Amino acid sequence: MVLIDLDATGTATTTVTIALSDAPETIRAREAAGGVRWIWNDTRAWYAGLLSAGVRVARAWDLRLVHALLRDAAAVIDDHGLRAARAWDAALPDTLVVDTLFDLAEAASGPPDTAEAALEEYRRQRDVIDGSATPAALRLLAAAESAGALIAEELHAAGLPWSVDAHGALLERELGERRGQALPARIEEAAARVRAALGDPAASLDSQPRLLRSLHRAGLFVESTSRWELAEHDHPVVAPLVAYKKLMRLYTANGWSWMSEWVRDGRFRPVYVPAGVVTGRWASSGGGALQIPRQLRVAVRADPGWTLLTADVAQLEPRVLAAMSRDTALADAARGRDLYSGVVEAGAVATRAEAKIAMLGAMYGATTGESGRLLPRLRRTFPRAMALVDHAARVGEDGGVVSTWLGRTSPGPGEAWRAVQSRAGDAEASGIDETRARRSARDRGRFTRNFVVQGTAAEWALAWLADLRGRLAALEPVDAADAAPRSGPVFGRRPHLAFYLHDEIIVHTPSVHAEAVATAVRESAAAAGTLLFGSFPLDFPLDLRIGDTAEKG
DNA sequence: TCTAAGTGCGCG
DNA sequence: AAAGCGCGCACTTAGA
C-alpha cells in the first residue's frame, strides 16, 4: 500500500499502488525523478525497511499522524467523517516494527493497510484541511509532522556515534571495575559510608520507605529521600547518601547493561516517537534517549574523518512566545542577544537570573515564590506576550481547548475533570469539593498555558529539522574510502542528523563538510523562523559547536 | 506472578 | 521538596 502524489503543488493527485516486494526499487526510481510525495499509513512501518534497503525518501504524508492532528484540531470546520474513522487511531505495535520491510505485510493491527483505505483517508484529510479555518497553517503542520516522521526513522537508522571505550572508561573512573552480579567497588564503598553514618550495618538503601525510616532513626527528620531535601540538612549521612544515589543512578540507568543493550556497532539507536507528547514534542521509547545525562556526552564520538556539529537554540520558548503574541517589546529584548539579558535591559527585572526565573514562571504558571513575585513586572513590560499565556491558562481553567501557532489543539478536559468541576457546583458541595475543583482547574490552566508555547516551539523545531534535512541531502557525498559505514547505506557517505532533543541537534558529518553543515544549520534556523512567523522581526540564535565529541559548553 | 502506583532523577 | 510545564526509566511496595 503506497501511493504517489505526482503533483508537486498537491492540488491534484495521480496515484500508483506499489506491491510490497517491488517497493524499494520502485520508490528509488521515482525518487530519482523527483517531485514525489509518498502517502502511507504509517511511516514507521515503511521507512525502516526502505532505509535498510538503501532508499531515502524526500517527502511523505503520514496518514496516521495527520489523522491524529485533524481529529483534535479546533480549526476543523467539517471533518468529512474523519473522527468516525476510528481505525486510523491505531498505532502500529512496537513489536511489529522491525528492520525488514517484508515482515510487516501481515501486520495484525495498526492503521488500515490497503491502498483503497489510504487513498480515501488521504482525500478526506485534504478536504478537511482545505475547508478548515486555517488551511495554510494546517497544511504546513501536516507536512512538518510527516517530515518529522521521516526524520525519526532516519535518526534511528543512522544512530548517534557512540564510543564504548569512552563510556567504559567513564564508568570505571566513576564506579570502579565491573564486577558481574556484584555492585562495583565505588558503590559498595559509598553504601558502607552511608550505613556507618546511619549506625545501621544492615540498612536498606534502595527501598524508599525503609531508607526513610533509617534516616529518622538516625535523627534526620526528612519527609522524603530526595536529594533536594537531603541537601538542606546538615547531617553526616547526607554527603555519602547523595554520592551513593548518584553512583547508583549512573550504574542502573546508563551502566554496562545499558551499554550492551543499546549501543550496537558503535551507534546508539534510540526509538524516537514523533508527536509522542500531546504538545507535539517527540517522545522516545527505549534507551532513555531523551534523558542521556550530560555526564555521558564524552561517549559521543565522531567516526575517523568525521566530526560532530552540536547546535541548540537559545531560549526557544520565550522567543516563540514573542513571535506568536507579536510582542515587539519582547522581540526587541531577544533580538541579536541573550534574551534574558535583554529582559534585564528592558527594565523588567534586575538580574539575568531573575529574568530567567520570571520568564519560566510565566510560561509554566508559577504563582508563588520568587517567580510569582516577579510576574507583575513582566506583565507590565511585555503585556502582549503575558496576555497570550494568561489567556491560554484561563481557557484551560474554564474547560476549553487551546491551539498552537500552526493549529495543534490540546486535548479536551477528561470526564473525571468535568465531574470534579460539576460536583463543586452542586448545592450541597463541600469546601473540600470546591478546593479540589479549584485546584484541578488551576492544574489544567497551567497545562494549557504551557501547551501553546511548548507546542509552538516544537513546531519551530520540526520546521528547522525538515529544512536542514533537505540542505544536508544536497551536499556531495564523500568517497567510499571516507565512508562511515556504521551509519548505514543511506547516510554512511553524507552528513546526517544523529540526535535531536526538543531544541538541540547533533549532526554527524564528514569533516570536509563541517563548515557547510554549520552554514546549513544556521540558514535552516532562520528559514524556520520565516516559515512560521513571516517577517516578524525576531531571530533564533544558535549555540553551535564543532568537534569530535558532543560535550556541551 | 502479574500489574499498578509511588518515588526519585535524568532530560528539555 | 519543589515552588512551575512536558516526558521515560529503574526500582520498590501494595494489591489482586
Image: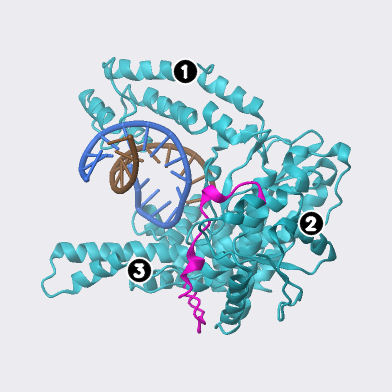
Chain colours: A cyan, B brown, C blue
Question: Front-most of A237 and A151?
Answer: A151
Q: CA distance from mark 2 to mark 1?
A: 55 Å
The residue identified by callout 2 is: A25
Q: Which residues are magenta?
A: A72-101
Q: Amino acid at mark 3?
A: Pro
Q: Amino acid at mark 1?
A: Arg
Q: Nearer the viewer, mark 1 or mark 3?
A: 3
Q: Position of residue B7 (x, y in %)?
A: 31, 39
The residue indicated by pointer 1 is A186
Q: Give the mark, 2 or 3, whose residue is nearer the N terminus.
A: 2
- For the residues labelled 2 and 1, say whether their Cβ atoms are less than 8 Å apart: no
The location of residue A44, given as percent across then percent down, is: 61, 55
Query: Dot 2 lies on which element?
Result: helix
Mark 1: secondary structure: helix
Q: Is residue A208 visible?
A: yes
Judging from the image, mark 2 belongs to the subunit labelled A
The answer to whether residue A71 is magenta is: no
